[in-house]
Amino acid sequence: MTPGTTETPGTERSPRVAAARKLLRRAGRDRAGRFLVEGAQAVREALAAARVHELFVTDAAAERNAELVARARERGVRTLTVTDRAAATLSETVTPQGLVAVCDLVDVPVDRALAGAPGFVTVCAGIADPGNLGTVVRVADAAGCDAVLLAGDTVDPHNGKAVRASTGSVFHLPIARGRDAARVVGTCRAAGLTTLVADGRGELDLHDPAAAPLLAGPVAWILGSEAHGPGPEVYAAADHRVRVPIHGGAESLNLATAAAICLYATVAARAGIAPGRSPATG
Amino acid sequence: MTPGTTETPGTERSPRVAAARKLLRRAGRDRAGRFLVEGAQAVREALAAARVHELFVTDAAAERNAELVARARERGVRTLTVTDRAAATLSETVTPQGLVAVCDLVDVPVDRALAGAPGFVTVCAGIADPGNLGTVVRVADAAGCDAVLLAGDTVDPHNGKAVRASTGSVFHLPIARGRDAARVVGTCRAAGLTTLVADGRGELDLHDPAAAPLLAGPVAWILGSEAHGPGPEVYAAADHRVRVPIHGGAESLNLATAAAICLYATVAARAGIAPGRSPATG
């Protein structure tokens, strides 16, 4: 607490808590241009990478995270001590963390995400489940992607579940949104990226030698919706449809595991792990 | 309905429904040696691959799945028409399917799962989340594994969430359980498999050229618990600890995506996609 001021814990009825609560919904986030980030790790990432406006913290959480709260105050973040109950109303988790930050939305325009000659991009074209989206952002980050583009009806990356599943990765690489999925694919191609749709019925096997030079070059992977893949306009706009080979009795893979396999096949190709090539000679 | 018999719909109090409900819990499954399988696709897989004893079906589900219910009856499966409410008490899903089968547990002894010179095995050593386990079984199936071994404190593969996440794969390849994880690893080594622990801090990079010959040979991948990896006894018993390289700002990958990357790196190595090798010459 700043010396000389008297703070009473904010309740769920406090105007600032009530205003923050609107950010639990997409309409509220889009209107305010802000979103909520919960928990010590995510708040730490937000302070490092995003513009944080407010921090709501319970007494218990302030004690557990004294250094983090002090750092937020140093940076001019408005901090409000709140009751457990008020913190719970800002949380979508079973066990609220008592620490919730209000941040500016992280997405940037598509053109800016693709500035600087990107070599490796992930495009989410219609991912509906926020947990899946967050997991894909996490894998794209780990694989070293330059950006993640969210095209068409993809779920909001600022959704609480998406942010949690990304475990901080929403703050690590540029994220951009474009409503017109075919146009996003076209922008990728114009940026010099070969556009590959991950598709269980794709004509090109991920492990076909013909895929290796594509994967080793500048590439954008396009991941469609869980239920029905990307739309026909995306199929038409993309360069190739690539399938992960299925060797057993499974009919398919789930979205996140298929994405991980495709993105890391790309990482392997860049490490020189491709037919007839070696890291020493290739 | 068989001509000449009169069936009244079973309620949640019917003895057979009550007995089946005990299978929702692990103790009940272990005692009866049976588990529940819900939904048309899973029941179809169970009829093809497992011993099915009973089928509970609502009128609506019987109408939607007339052919499947007829096939079950032909095979001597005892079928009981039940009320929606009774079916719901056998379901763990938000929208009960109205179609639940009682099947024999699918697991076999470890020795039998490893019979016949296996070349590619997945070992789950402490996976706690049933959704994760089911997803790993699905990926192992898709990658063409010969078996999945569940070691130590790994969750029951017959858990409803695990069965659903596997999307039928629990019926596609041998699954075995062994309480002593180090012993399971030892059995894999005795079967001629190189044992690789997937570990974020492993000494061998998955994309290191030195990993390629290991991956191309007979291999067992060991996946530890979500929270703290496999136990020290598993580390000590295994041949190598292998890390998925992280290129961006992410600290780690989640269990299912890391498993998918490791298993499909193995698939790629077998397809000849390895440093200095090509499918034509390797």
Image (cartoon, coloured by chain):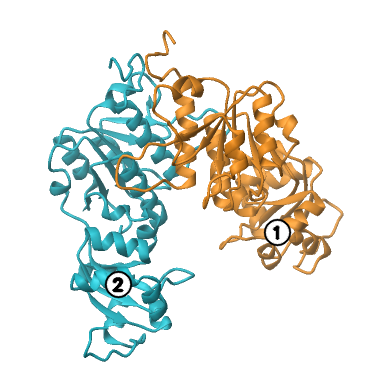
Chain colours: A cyan, B orange
When the figure is inspected, residue B250 is found, relative to residue A235, above or below; the finding is: below
Secondary element at tag 1: helix
Disc 2 packing (10 Å; few <14; some 14–19; many ≥20) = many
Q: Residue B38: image x %, image y %?
A: 65, 52
Secondary element at tag 2: helix
When the figure is inspected, residue B15 is found, relative to residue B110, above or below; the finding is: below
Quote the CA–CA distance across marks 1 and 2: 45 Å
Instruction: Say which amino acid is labelled 2.
Output: Val
Please determine if labels 1 and 2 lie on a single subunit. no
Q: In the visual, does B183 lie left or right of A32?
A: right
Quadrant, the C terminus of chain B: top left
Instruction: Say which amino acid is labelled 1.
Output: Leu
Q: Residue visible at 28% across and 74% down?
A: A55
Chain ID at mark 2: A
Q: Nearer the viewer, residue A146 or B171?
A: A146
Q: In the visual, does B144 lie left or right of B87?
A: left
Q: Residue A40: image x %, image y %?
A: 36, 65
Q: Residue visible at 48% across and 40% down?
A: B199
The picture quadrant where one finds residue B235 is top right
Q: Which mark, residue A180?
A: none
When the figure is inspected, residue B280 is found, relative to residue B148, above or below; the finding is: above
Chain ID at mark 1: B
Task: Kindly give the residue lying farthest to the top in the view shown.
Answer: B281
Tell me if I can see residue A25 in this picture: no
Q: Which residue is mark 1?
A: B24
Q: Which mark, residue A69?
A: 2
Disc 1 packing (10 Å; few <14; some 14–19; many ≥20) = some
The picture quadrant where one finds residue B84 is bottom right
Q: In the visual, does A36 lie left or right of B200?
A: left
Q: Residue A12: image x %, image y %?
A: 36, 85
Tell me if I can see residue A50 in this picture: yes
Q: Residue visible at 44% across and 41% down?
A: B200
